[in-house]
Image: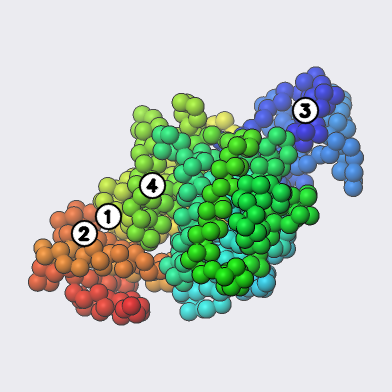
Amino acid sequence: MARESFEDEETAGLLNQYYVSIKVDREERPDIDAVYMKVCQALSGQGGWPLNVFLTPDRNPFYAGTYFPKTSVYGHPCFKDVLLSLKKQYDDNPSEIESLADRIVRTLSEESRRNVSLPEDVLDEVFNHLLQNFDPQYGGFGAAPKFPAPHQLLFLLRYARWRKNGRAVGMVRKTLVSIARGGIHDHIGGGFSRYATDRKWLVPHFEKMLYDQAMLAIAYTEAYQATADPLFERVIDDIFEYCGRELRSPSGGFYCAEDADSEGIEGKYYVWSREEVCEILGKEQARLFCTAYHIAREGNFNGKNIPNLIGTDPADLAQRFSVGAAELADRLHEAGKKLLEARNGRVHPRKDDKILTSWNGLMITALAKAGSVLHKKDYVNLAESAWQFVEKHLIQNGRLMARFRDGETRYDAYLDDYAFLSLACEALYEATFHPIYLKKMKHLADEMIARFWDEAGGGFRLCAARDKQLVLKTKDAYDHAIPSGNSAAAFVLLRLAQRTGESGYARYAEKVFSAFAEDIRTYPPGYTFMLTALLFRASIPKELIVLKGGKGDSFNDAIRRLQSLFLPEVTLFAGDEDTLGKLNPHLNVYSAIGGRTTYFLCEDFICHLPVVHLGQLLRQLGETDS
C-alpha cells in the first residue's frame, strides 16, 4: 500500500484534502495497534496488516480494513473509492457516523468473559493438532507460507518430557534441522528471515527481526539440551554472530530489524548469480560451494540464487570432493567468509534502529540461556551488557519505558516489556547465580501486577489501567510471532512462586488461565506459550538446591552438568548457605553435609534424601550419569 497508494500523488491528494493521516509504528505503540486491530476483527471478521482504520475526531472508529488495492480487484474496493465514499457518508450523515462509532466502542468495551477452569487435557489436544498439521518431509506446520513459530517447538519439547513422547521431540528436531538448511537461514551472514513463502523453507521474506533471532536461539538451545545435536550449537553461534555484527548497538542494546529490500528490490542484498560466486571464490572453491549450496546458472529466485543446504548430504559431498568432514566444513566456512566480505560491499538493507525493551528482554533471555547451556561466558556477558543498557536508558525516574532511539526514550512500558524482562532476569540468574537478578524479577512482577492486572475480569491489560488515551483497554493472550504478554506473565508468575515460595503469584497465574480459558479451548494451538506455562504446572514442578560446601568440591562441575540438561520442570538454586538464605527464607533449612557440595531435590512439598554425589542426584532426576 505504501508504493501503490500512500506514495501515489492522486491518492495522497485525497488523503491530505479530506483526512488527517496518522501513521502508527505498531512496534512502538502496540497498545494502539491492539485496540484498532480488535475493531477491525469485529467489523470485518478478520485482521492483519496493513491495518487501515477511520476514526471520528474523538478517536472512535467507524470503518476498518486491511489491504485496499490501488484498483478494485476480486471484490476488494480500491483505496481511492473507499476514501471518497467514506467522505461522502460523513458529510451527508455526520451524526449517524458518530453514533455508529460510539456503538462500536461501547459494544467492544462491554465484552465479558466467564471465568472457567482450563483442564489439562487441552495439552494433549494441542499436541494432537500439531501432529496432524506437521509436515514430515520438511518440518514445520501447515502449508505455505511457513513460519518457524519457536514457541510451538518449546511447547513440544516440554510435552515430550512430560508425556515421554518421542514423536514430539522428532517433530522439533525435524523442523529445526529443516529451517537451518533452508533459504530462510542466511548461510552467508547468519540469522533467519521472518518466514518462508514455500513448503521447503527455501524462499524467505527476507526481513530479519530481532525477536525471531531471540526466540529461535532459545528453541535451538533447548533442543540442544534435549538432543545434544551439534548442528544446533553451530546454529546458535551463527545467530549470535549475526546479531552481534548487525543488530547490536555500540551501547549494548539490540536494534529491531533489517528490511527485506535494498535498492528497492526485495532480497537483492542476499542473492547470488553463479558467475558472481565463481569470480569471488575461484574455480575450485566455487565448485565445492555451488554444489553444496545449490548455486545454479538458472537460479532459484528470479534468476539468482538463495544459498541453501536442502537435500545436501555432507557425507556424500565429502566423498565426492575427497575430503574429510572437518576439512569440508573448514573449506565451506572459508568460502562463506569471502562471500560475506563481498556482500558487505553491496547496498545494505535499511536497519530499524529502535531499541525495544520487550524484544531486548527476549534477546537477553536467549543469550543468558545459551551462555549457560553451552558454557560460553561471552554470551552471558552480552546478556548482562544488554541488561545494563536497559537499566541505563530505558528506566526513567524509576519507571520502565518501552523504546529508545537516537538518544530519546519514549512511552511508558507495556505488559510485554515487564513480562519479557522478568523472563530475562530468571535466565540471567540461572546463568550467573547472582541473587540480584531474582530480586529484580520479583520487583518487575510486582510492578506488572500493580500496573496491568484486571481485577474484575482477570488477566493483564496491555497498557496501564490509568492510561486514558485509548478508547478501549485491551487484553490478549494469543501467541503470534512472539508469546503474548499474558502468556509470558503466567509463566513468570508460576516460576516466581517457585523462586520465592509465595503462592500468591501462582494464584494470579491460575486467574490468567481462567480468564482466557474460553478463547484457548476455541483454538488451543494459538496459545502454545500460555499452555507451556500450564504444562509447567502440570509437570509437578521441582526445586533443586545445589548447596556449595566449605570445601567447594565439584560445585562448578556439577553446575555445568546440570545446565547442559533439559530439565524444564526444575527450578534451580545454587550458592552457599548465606547467599541462599538471603534469597529465600525457605532455603535457610538446608546445610551442606560434611562441608561438601550437597544436592536437595524437592517436589510437591516433599524432599528426597540429600546427596553429595552428582550421579545420585541424576538418578533422582531420572537422568543417566554420562
User: Is residue 270 something one can see in this rendering?
Assistant: yes
What residue does disc 4 label?
383
Q: How far apart are marks 3 and 2 (CA)?
A: 60 Å
Q: How far apart are marks 1 and 3 (CA)?
A: 53 Å
Residue at image position (66%, 73%) is 136
What residue does disc 2 label?
575
Vertical side of 594 occupied by 200: above or below: above
First along the sequence among labels 4 and 1? 4
Tag 4 secondary structure: helix
First along the sequence among labels 2 and 4? 4
First along the sequence among labels 1 and 3? 3
Residue 527, position in %: x, y?
A: 58, 60
Vertical side of 248 occupied by 301: above or below: below
First along the sequence among labels 3 and 2? 3
Tag 3 secondary structure: loop
Residue 433, disc: 1
Residue 599, disc: none
First along the sequence among labels 4 and 3? 3
